[in-house]
């Protein structure tokens, strides 16, 4: 991955989560699990304590868009 990811990279993280967890419906994922999935991504360099509900929600929505594109194609 060319750059390190942080909590502000919702679109890039959403794409990676869609590729990493293709079987999951993002809207069914609890924020505690989402936080763990994000921090476990290769290339994620953000401070685990720097997340908040708004950032997690932005990531979840970006992941959901990817999920919809894949499942409705």
Image: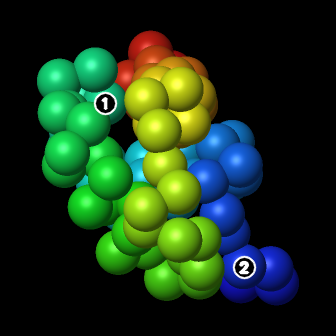
Could you say which is closer to the camera, residue 70 or residue 40?
A: 40
SS assignment at label 2: loop
| Residue at figure coordinates x 20%, y 45% from the top left | 32
* Side of 71 relative to 33 (left or right): right
> Residue 41's image quarter?
bottom left
**Image check: 53 left or right of 23?**
right
Q: Quadrant of the N terminus?
A: bottom right
Q: Residue furthest front?
A: 49
Q: Is residue 23 left or right of 19 when viewed as pictured?
A: left
- Compare marks 2 and 1 and give the one earlier in the sequence: 2
Q: Disc 2 marks which residue?
A: 4
In the picture, measured across the screen, residue 7 lies left or right of residue 72, that is right
- At x 53%, y 57%, the residue is 50
Image point 17% across, 24% down: which residue? 28
Packing grade of label 1 (10 A; few <14, some 14-19, many >=20) is many
Q: Tell me if residue 56 comes above or below residue 46 in the rendering.
A: above
Q: Residues within 10 Å of mark 2 (few under 14, many from 20)?
A: few
- Total labels drawn: 2
Q: What colour-coding does the image apply?
A: rainbow
- Tell me residue 67's x, y (percent): 43, 30
Q: Is residue 60 above or below residue 13?
A: above
Image location (x, y in percent) of residue 3: 80, 80
Q: Which residue is label 1 attached to? A: 26
* Residue 63 shows in the view: no
| Helix, strand or loop under label 1 | helix
Residue 17 position in % (x across, y down): 43, 53
Q: Is residue 49 above or below residue 9?
A: below
Image coordinates for residue 18, horizontal then vertical, percent: 43, 47
Give the residue at x 53% y 71%: 47
Residue 21 in view (yes/no)? yes
Real-space Cα separation, disc 2 to disc 1, in angstroms: 23 Å
């Amino acid at each position: 991955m060319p750059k390190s990811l942080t909590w502000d990279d919702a679109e890039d993280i959403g794409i990676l989560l869609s590729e990493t967890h293709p079987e999951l419906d993002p809207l069914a994922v609890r924020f505690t699990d989402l936080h763990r999935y994000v921090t476990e991504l290769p290339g994620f360099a953000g401070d685990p304590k720097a997340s908040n509900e708004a950032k997690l929600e932005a990531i979840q929505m970006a992941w959901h868009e990817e999920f919809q594109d894949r499942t409705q194609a």
